[in-house]
Amino acid sequence: MATRSGDDQVRYGIIGSGMMGGEHLLDLAHVPGAVAVALADPVEASLEWGRACAGHPVDTYHDYTELLARDDLDAVVVATPNMTHAAVLDDVLATDLAVLVEKPLCTTVEDAVAVAHRADGRDALTWVGLEYRFIPTVQTMVRELGTGRHGTTRMVSVREHRFPFLKKVGDWNRFNENSGGTLVEKCCHFFDLMRLVAGAEPVRVLASGGQDVNHLDEVYDGRVPDILDNAFVVVEFANGVRGMLDLCMFAEGGRFEQELTVVGDAGKYETTVPGDTVWWGPRDGAGPVEVPAPMHPDVPYPEFHMGSSFVEHLHFVDHVRSGTPPQVTVWDGVWSVAMGAAAHRSIDEGRPVLLEELGAPFGPA
């Protein structure tokens, strides 16, 4: 598709220039054929951060609808706080701009489904920022799984042992009502990867979790945060694959922040984030064998999710130009939210939860 500038340069507007908006801006400064020309954020300090990250003069707005009224944009990134996504996307999806919306798509399944149906009616690209798919070790593992040498996938596990949630503007991420809950806000990435690797839709979730260590001594407007800081989640898929998430957000002292394994009936793959290697181990004991997982050579900021946001934009720009469907769809975003929401319901109600209780199966009408 021709860009509005007529010079094949994809011109971005960034809505939300806080932590993730800044990451997008820093990466876009190095993406060939892309440029951020406008930022919108109601918080002046965030706009200052965005200007610094852009590295060149950009137009700024406190009201994102003024940004949307421009006639020179090709694409918009939505990186606002989670609880604002549904309302912001209501306006953004009314335009003909390509859209990349940060995860989670929305904080509730109902809002996510409504957004997805609206996006289905557009000709323009709508892409969900589940950038973990573009982490080097994850990409390499998925390619390896495509060879089939591990046999039939049976089990997928993700362990994330990390630091507590960072502080955000207005401390919005301290409360489930704003974030969607830890298992939606943070873990939608991992549920998306489980579903991608399983090759089937989830049907049942069983979870146990709590808030045992973090944020218990914090008070905001008289309220103590209610976000989970640890959980075990088991997901059963329609094809018999089982997934498991082991999350702890007070475990900074570990060797790796994340560990991923996929086991088939003929062998096992395992890898880490951060990392640059995937290990393959056949059941006959002739392993493990190291499979290199190099980072894209042009990644400017490896510390930002192992360069995955940068790689995501390389793909996104190509899709904007070609008009081809997104690699990560709005329905991928819906499923990742639904799996997290089911896990929260399982914890709250002390029982397994069927995805059909939340409206599954999800997809175009």
Image (cartoon, rainbow, N blue to C red):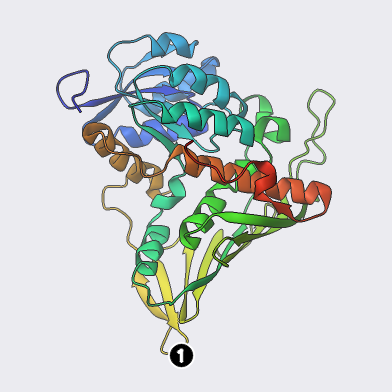
Residue located 48% across and 16% down the image: 91
- From the viewer's perspective, is residue 5 above or below residue 20? above
Give coordinates of residue 281: x percent, y percent. 44, 81
Give coordinates of residue 107: x percent, y percent. 63, 33
Quadrant holding the N terminus:
top left
Give coordinates of residue 203: x percent, y percent. 62, 55
- From the viewer's perspective, is residue 315 above or below residue 353? above
Residue located 81% across and 41% down the image: 216
Q: Is residue 87 left or right of residue 204?
A: left
Label 1 packing within 10 angstroms: few (<14), some (14-19), many (20+):
few
Q: Quadrant of residue 150?
A: bottom left
Residue located 41% across and 26% down the image: 121
Look at mark 1 in the image and give the residue it sits on: 285
Q: Amino acid at mark 1?
A: Gly
Residue 164 seen in this snapshot: no
Q: Is residue 347 left or right of residue 30?
A: right
